[in-house]
Image: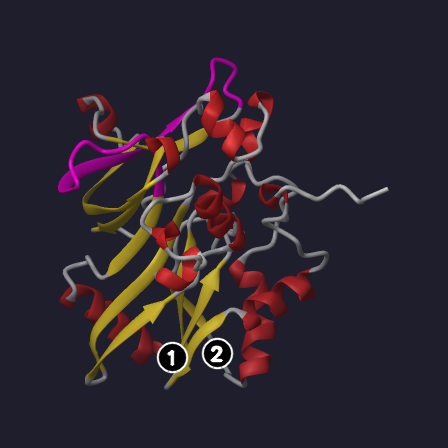
Amino acid sequence: MAKKSIHPFKQIHPWRSEKEFADDLLNNIIYDKDGLVVLNKPYGIPRGKGSSEFNRTNSVSHSVHYTLEDALPHIRSQLKYPQLTISKCPEKYISGVTLLAADTDILNAIDVAYVRSYHFGNTYWVITVGVPTIQENNYRLALKIISDPQYKNRKTILTRSWTSNEEKYRRVKIFKARYEIISNSTFNLCSLLKLRASTENSAPGLPNLDEKLLQLLEVHLKQQEIIPAHIHLQSTMLPSLFGEDVFLQAPLPPFFNWTCKQLEFKHLMQNDVPCEERI
């Protein structure tokens, strides 16, 4: 009898120990030079246990409770750095480019580079439900947490509308964004966007999905909570970092790449090439 395959959305956190988790981060380092270390952060992993997002209910199927800070001692030891500090890190439900610094000079240089980029140095790849009516545009957007009446299944969404009270009491996080459509999916159910945001914490969640889309994702109606928010910090530009422009790119996570294939994004399916290789 053939062994039943495990859905990719249930394999986002495959580690069986903290050591295995830390080794995986080491294997996903994309840059290591002059005290700047850059890794590809997995989805659903927060910065540290002291962060507010650590205490947030983890919506990842079969999730672990490790943090980036848990893995730092092992990473420092293996790379032979006496110190490593997290400089820039996407929020818990965003994967991608994460910057570590070996000393305060590197930390300060990264901050200055962000200012030089006008805080638009980060480029995200995002899968949306539905197709935007305009091919590319600038928006003022907000992050907002919603839940069902029983306050279960809370999720973060990206919205273009909010109340003055929500803004006044900081119940939403507002930022500016520029986007362009990379490709539309089969049946025009979704779009793959390239989004440049003025904040590093910009994670849209997925609302309830229609039946055709759930079929493509091989997810039953009552399993929608296993679908991750598909947003990946794909690249970061650090202008004039110690005299040179540093461009950093992080490959898509396996689950994100799988979704791209399932949704048959038209632009990406012109050739039989993995989505991540066309970044």
Residue at image mark 2:
83
Amino acid at pointer 1 = Asp
Amino acid at pointer 2 = Gln
- The stretch in magenta equals 127-152
Q: x, y percentage for residue 138?
A: 13, 42
- Dots 1, 2 in contact, CB < 8 A: yes
Residue that sits furthest to the top in the current view: 149
Q: x, y percentage for residue 61?
A: 61, 39
Disc 1 versus disc 2: distance between alpha carbons? 7 Å
Quadrant location of the N terminus in the rendered image? top right
Q: Nearer the viewer, residue 17 or 55?
A: 17
Residue at (47, 52) in percent of width and height: 257
Task: Decide: few, some or many residues near mark 2? Use Cα within 10 Å; few <14, some 14-19, many ≥20.
Answer: some
Q: Which corner quadrant of the image does residue 107 belong to?
A: bottom left
Residue at (59, 80) in percent of width and height: 77
Secondary structure under the numbered disc 2 in the rendered image: loop
Residue at image mark 1:
103
Which colour assignment does the render follow? Answer: secondary structure
Residue at (56, 21) in percent of width and height: 221
Secondary structure under the numbered disc 1 in the rendered image: loop
